[in-house]
Amino acid sequence: MERLSDYIQGERVVRELRHHAPEALEELARDLAQPLNPPLERAVARCLDDSRVPDFRSAEVLMPPMMATFAVGPAAFGEQALAELEASCNRCEAVGRCWQAMRSHADAEVCRDFCPNAETFIEQRGE
């Protein structure tokens, strides 16, 4: 369980970035490999869940590594199907959870619990 002081520290950093350097917050959210302390990582995930990073698009940042997690690539889908998957990804309500999962290289079984496109990815690869 997150301590109150850790929660406040992470939220404070995110709030300052949102107000004073929104481009830095967006860059931070787009960089899945950037090391972050746990309170800041959780705060960024909450920020993504609340759509407080205006230019963040899940389909651009999270869908490519998610597809790799399920061992399927964009070429496996037609243009219309891929557009539908991207739209589903951009509407996802588990963006923060997904972001944390992609940062930690979670496996397909973990991602299957929350990814709205998981079943389509699984069907495409033939499982």
Image (cartoon, rainbow, N blue to C red):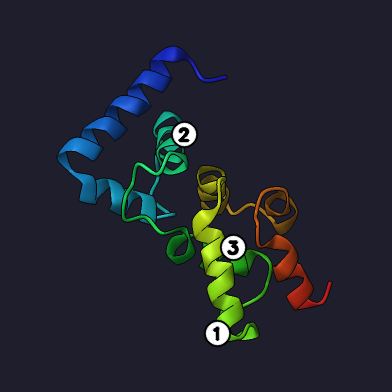
Q: Position of residue 79 (x, y in %)?
A: 55, 84
The reply to whether dot 1 and dot 2 touch (C-beta < 8 Å) is no
Are there few (<14), some (14-19), or many (20+) residues within 10 Å of tag 3? many
Residue carrying label 1 = 79
The reply to whether dot 3 and dot 2 touch (C-beta < 8 Å) is no
**Amino acid type assigned to the residue bearing label 2 in the image:** Arg
Q: Position of residue 97 (x, y in %)?
A: 56, 43
Front residue of 6/116: it is: 116
Q: Position of residue 24 (x, y in %)?
A: 23, 48
**Amino acid type assigned to the residue bearing label 1 in the image:** Glu
Front residue of 85/41: it is: 85
Q: Secondary structure at mark 1?
A: helix
Q: Which mark is residue 61?
A: none
Q: Secondary structure at mark 3?
A: helix
Residue drawn at x 72%, y 54% is 112
Are there few (<14), some (14-19), or many (20+) residues within 10 Å of tag 2? many
Quarter of the image where one finds residue 32: bottom left
Looking at the image, residue 69 lies above or below residue 55: below
Marks 1 and 3 sit apart, C-alpha to C-alpha, by: 18 Å
**Amino acid type assigned to the residue bearing label 3 in the image:** Met
Q: Secondary structure at mark 2?
A: helix
Q: Which mark is residue 42?
A: 2
Direction from residue 118 to residue 84 in the image, left or right: left
Are there few (<14), some (14-19), or many (20+) residues within 10 Å of tag 1? few
Residue carrying label 3 = 66
- Disc 1 versus disc 3: nearer the observer: 1
Q: Position of residue 89 (x, y in %)?
A: 54, 60
